[in-house]
Image: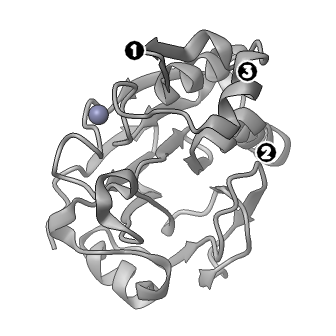
């Protein structure tokens, strides 16, 4: 199992291990998941347990997890933990996997257009602050591979709402009588509005690059897995 996108860095006494699988790592859609499969893939990092959202709702519900949680842990689009060794995971195909990392706790988010509109990033930062005392200014945020603003054409049913929404309208990209949208720019603005900062943004587009699965690119239900775990440095 190759995790070429994997990154790791150390903040104080804690190391964050995080990344996103590629097409070559196989399909990680919901009915293929097991805790054993995830733990095996990350075995070199000595994880203790692994969790996922049993349904991703394109909303702003955030689920807190710990070392006693295993497998599906509820419905929503954000996970947070302060437990070392707990692997959080989300599945994406064109939506943005968001990695929120601090030395005391971490969050992992699935964010598409609806999640951006509803404020899933702000909600997850809020949960980190309320439950773990994490100041948003101390959170490092990374945006993983997602559909780029040249490929992400807004559906008609989203367009009218976006044009009338001060939070979304600046990130519409009109082109040849169509409207595209920058998920990354909207999330960077949402982070800044919450007092946090996006430290890096993947330049890989799930649709026009062929390294990742893309729902709009014709990959159906296939998904990559994004994962984030804190462990002892
Ligand atoms: Zn693209």
Relative height, residue 72 to residue 2 (above, below): below
Q: Which residue matches tag 2?
A: 127
Q: Residue at x 48, y 24 (%)?
A: 182
**Residue 172 location (% of width, % of height):** 55, 17
Ranked by sequence position, the earlier of labels 1 and 3 is 1
Which residue is nearer to you in this view: 172 or 101?
172
Side of 192 relative to 172 (left or right):
right
Answer whether labels 2 and 3 touch (C-beta < 8 Å): no
Answer whether labels 2 and 1 touch (C-beta < 8 Å): no
> Badge 3: few (under 14), some or many (20 or more) residues near its Cα, within 10 Å?
some
Element assignment for label 3: loop
Answer whether labels 1 and 3 touch (C-beta < 8 Å): no
Residue at disc 2, CB closer than 8 Å to ligand 1 = no
Ranked by sequence position, the earlier of labels 2 and 3 is 2
> Is the N terminus in the top left, top right, bottom left or bottom right quadrant?
bottom left
Q: Residue at x 37, y 40 (%)?
A: 10
Does residue 29 show up?
A: yes
User: Label 2 to label 1, Cα distance in Å?
Assistant: 41 Å
Which marked residue is nearer to the observer: mark 1 or mark 3? Answer: 1
Mark seen at residue 176: 1
Relative height, residue 176 to residue 201 (above, below): above
Q: Residue at x 37, y 74 (%)?
A: 28
**Residue 100 location (% of width, % of height):** 55, 40
User: Label 1 to label 3, Cα distance in Å?
Assistant: 34 Å
Side of 48 relative to 201 (left or right):
right
Q: Which residue, as the protein is rendered here, is positioned at the far right?
A: 130
Element assignment for label 1: loop
User: Label 2 to label 3, Cα distance in Å?
Assistant: 12 Å
Q: Which residue matches tag 3?
A: 194
Side of 50 relative to 210 (left or right):
right
Mark seen at residue 50: none
Q: Residue at x 66, y 22 (%)?
A: 190
């Amino acid at each position: 199992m190759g995790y070429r996108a994997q990154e790791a860095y150390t903040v104080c006494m804690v190391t964050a291990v995080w990344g996103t699988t590629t097409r070559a790592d196989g399909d990680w859609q919901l009915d293929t998941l097991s805790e054993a499969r995830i733990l095996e893939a990350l075995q070199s990092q000595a994880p203790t347990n692994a969790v996922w959202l049993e349904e991703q709702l394109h909303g702003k519900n955030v689920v807190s997890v710990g070392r006693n949680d295993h497998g599906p842990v509820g419905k929503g689009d954000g996970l947070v933990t302060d437990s070392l060794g707990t692997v959080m995971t989300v599945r994406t195909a064109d939506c943005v996997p968001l990695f929120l990392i601090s030395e005391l706790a971490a969050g992992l988010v699935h964010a598409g257009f609806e999640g951006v509109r509803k404020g899933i990033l702000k909600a997850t930062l809020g949960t980190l602050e309320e439950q773990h005392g994490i100041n948003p200014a101390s959170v490092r945020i990374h945006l993983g591979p997602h559909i780029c603003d040249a490929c992400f054409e807004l559906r008609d049913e989203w367009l009218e709402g976006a044009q009338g929404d001060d939070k979304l309208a600046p990130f519409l990209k009109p082109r040849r009588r169509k409207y595209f949208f920058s998920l990354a720019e909207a999330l960077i603005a949402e982070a800044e509005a919450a007092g946090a900062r996006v430290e890096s943004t993947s330049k890989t587009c799930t649709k026009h690059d062929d390294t990742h699965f893309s729902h709009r690119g014709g990959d159906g239900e296939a998904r990559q897995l994004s994962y984030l775990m804190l462990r002892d440095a």
